[in-house]
Amino acid sequence: MKQYKVESVGLSDKVYSNIKEMILNRDLIPGQKLVQEEVAERLGVSRTPILSAFSKLEKEWLVKNFPRRGYYIYEMSLEERINLFEIRLRLEPLGARRAAEFGTEEDKDELLKMVNNADSLAETKDFAKFNKHDYEFHKLINSMSRNEMLSNMISSYNIISLSNQNIESIDFKLSIIGHKKIAQAIASGNPDLAEEVMKNHIEGGLVMLKDHK
Amino acid sequence: MKQYKVESVGLSDKVYSNIKEMILNRDLIPGQKLVQEEVAERLGVSRTPILSAFSKLEKEWLVKNFPRRGYYIYEMSLEERINLFEIRLRLEPLGARRAAEFGTEEDKDELLKMVNNADSLAETKDFAKFNKHDYEFHKLINSMSRNEMLSNMISSYNIISLSNQNIESIDFKLSIIGHKKIAQAIASGNPDLAEEVMKNHIEGGLVMLKDHK
DNA sequence: TTTTTTTATTTTGTATACAATATATTACAC
DNA sequence: GTGTAATATATTGTATACAAAATAAAAAAA
């Protein structure tokens, strides 16, 4: 299995970001149990920082705690996935709008570069890879929004959203076309357009979700 | 000082809900430090469940951790408060819309009762009391929305929003009038109207915030 | 005095210890 | 064999222990 990097100060953050990344990589899948001692040993820490990390992850809906029975990767029902899309449908357009307003030129270039390098992804059908790309794309936009709460909020929820998405309910090509429209709207500094195309993009995902069971 | 009730199974939840309630009551104010041993002793627990609780609270922006220096009640800048209002402006109308759609008759009655009992609050100028009322009002609506993520999300952020609000930037009477309109729109099962009046209500708060420093 | 340096105390972050519960395994009845 | 009771093992939740760092207090220098 792939070795994960550690980007943190405290051991708790180390655990936290490791689990997050493993979920995004689909090395941890919904319903899977997280045994504290196992994670602790794998990362070379005690169970104390594990507890803090899991508590944080729980608040982000990435894991769910069943008292006395442990922590499990959050498994979303269809209803929950739809409900989360409704939230994203409200928040991501705001992020895109603000990105168009407040994003730096460097960020906008980065965003354009990202979508231009993504064409190959549409063909490969590498689900985990596409997931990470999709996550990073939305994350960059939201970080450009200069609203840290908004940014953190959406990034968190997008992880578990992607984690619970099945490959049939994604149209890789359509998604990447959407990303291009969004990137261009943001790069051209058009808040209204950015908001609108982002809304369409998320709505597209919601329709796919509802259709494919 | 008032004695707080405990509504939980684990000790970590006990600490978690206690701190939350104390923030809402303004017994803990922005910038104030939370010394782990003090909280532990006050609640009769060890420092272990404190850590988990603080980690959760941090993810909800109720507290902020400064490595090796401890946890502090989150102190928001004006910009952050405005940014949070922008988020609420997107999410709360969704909650109101869904409350009108999915709320039970019992909940709707409860909501109407709540606003009818609130007239006295406009006069008293008891800030902590008004805060709690405002919190409970919005919380009920969001719990009626049958979108648990949305509900939890907004409730969390409303606590720290209220905690960081100063009395000058609230118009008690106007706020309660707004609540009445919202409650009536929801109770009459009108999603479009509910969404609109909620949007107006939050926008009113945002204007007050921007005006009063 | 006021400022700086040194020493003592407090507080944090992590590791370990332990009791209570949950899960797995074995033994036994049918 | 299959199902149930008894036992053993593993896992959790909490408490305690301890080293490292931060803060406070005391001593020394200006």
Image (spheres, coloured by chain):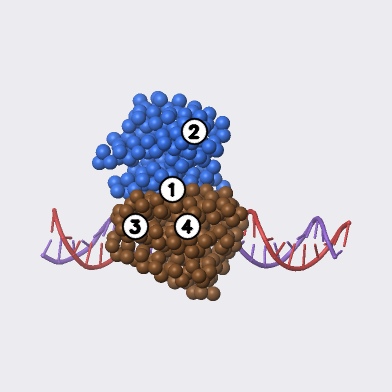
Chain colours: A blue, B brown, C purple, D red
> Residue B167 location in percent, x, y?
56, 63
Q: Vertically, is A20 above or below A119?
A: below
Spatial separation of the CA atoms under disc 3 and disc 2: 35 Å
Q: Are marks 1 and 3 on the same chain?
A: yes
Q: What residue is rendered at 35% in x and 57% in y?
A: B185
Residue density around tag 4, few if under 14, some if 14–19, many if 20 or more, within 10 Å: many
> Residue A188 location in percent, x, y?
51, 29
Closer-to-camera residue (B173/B3): B173
Closer-to-camera residue (D9/A147): A147
Label 1 with label 2: CB-CB less than 8 Å: no
Q: Vertically, is C24 above or below A26?
A: below
Disc with the residue nearer the chain's start (1 vs 3): 1
Where is mark 2, residue-wise? A190
> Residue A5 location in percent, x, y?
50, 39
Where is mark 1, residue-wise? B90
Q: Which quadrant of the figure has residue A115?
A: top left
Closer-to-camera residue (B159/C13): B159
Label 3 with label 2: CB-CB less than 8 Å: no
Q: Nearer the viewer, mark 1 or mark 3?
A: 3
Dot 4 amino acid type:
Asn
Q: Nearer the viewer, mark 3 or mark 4?
A: 3
Label 1 with label 3: CB-CB less than 8 Å: no
Dot 2 amino acid type:
Asn
Dot 3 amino acid type:
Ile
Q: Which quadrant of the figure has residue D24?
A: bottom right
Spatial separation of the CA atoms under disc 3 and disc 4: 20 Å
Where is mark 3, residue-wise? B186
> Residue C20 location in percent, x, y?
37, 68
Q: Are marks 2 and 4 on the same chain?
A: no
Where is mark 4, residue-wise? B158
Q: Are marks 1 and 2 on the same chain?
A: no
